[in-house]
Image: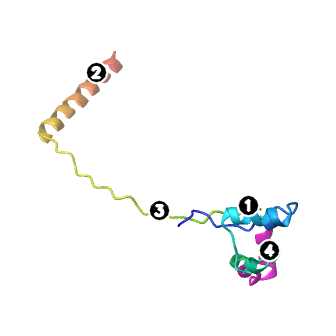
């Protein structure tokens, strides 16, 4: 099943909960890391945390200060919608253009008459 967000370990946010309540919350959210299957108090290491530890210390400080405390959603790029449309058929296009030109000329003439007065 595809989810538009990462399943997240809430251990950092809910330190006031009892361990059994915390485990119930983690199981309800769907986050069951392999490290915590054996022991309920084992702290799992997320892959994003491991990648963050590989960065230089200065970059780590900047990222940790600027990132929010709520986990970010994964970027999802939807497929482009296919549009199947055809041009409308315009009968008597030349006649329509001539009528439009006549209307525009009539409007121009009426404006010039008003301005000349």
Q: Which residue is denoted by mark 2 in the rendering? A: 110
Q: Look at the numbered disc 3 and give the secondary structure of its residue.
A: loop
Quadrant of the image occupied by residue 70: bottom right
Spatial CA span between label 1 and label 3: 24 Å
Question: Is 52 a magenta residue?
Answer: yes
For residue 40, which numbered disc appears in the image? Answer: 4
CB-based contact (under 8 Å), mark 2 and mark 4: no
Q: Tell which circle, 1 or 2, labels the residue nearer the N-terminal end.
A: 1
Check whether the beta carbons of the residues at disc 3 and disc 2 lie within 8 A of each other: no
- Label at residue 2: none
Q: Could you say where residue 65 lies in the image, as x and y percent from the top left?
A: 80, 67
Left/right placement of residue 101 relative to residue 31 reads left
Q: Is residue 67 visible?
A: no
Residue at figure coordinates x 69%, y 72% from the top left: 32
Q: Position of residue 116 (x, y in %)?
A: 33, 19
- Identify the disc placed on residue 78: 3
Question: Mark 1 near mark 2, Cβ–Cβ under 8 Å?
Answer: no
Residue placed under numbered mark 1 in the picture:
70
User: Of discs 3 and 2, which sits in the foreground?
Assistant: 3
Q: Quadrant of residue 81?
A: bottom left
Image depth: mark 1 or mark 4 in front: 4
Q: Earlier in the sequence, mark 2 or mark 4?
A: 4
């Amino acid at each position: 099943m595809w989810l538009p967000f990462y399943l997240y370990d809430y251990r950092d946010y809910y330190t006031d909960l009892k361990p059994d309540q915390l485990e119930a919350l983690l199981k309800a959210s769907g986050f069951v890391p392999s490290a915590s299957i054996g022991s309920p108090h084992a702290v799992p290491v997320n892959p994003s945390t491991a990648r963050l530890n590989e960065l230089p210390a200065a970059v780590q400080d900047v990222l940790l200060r600027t990132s929010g405390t709520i986990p970010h959603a994964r970027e999802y790029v939807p497929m482009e919608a296919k549009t199947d449309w055809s041009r409308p058929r315009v009968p008597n296009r030349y006649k329509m253009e001539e009528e439009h030109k006549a209307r525009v000329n009539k409007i121009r003439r009426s404006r010039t008459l008003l301005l000349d007065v």
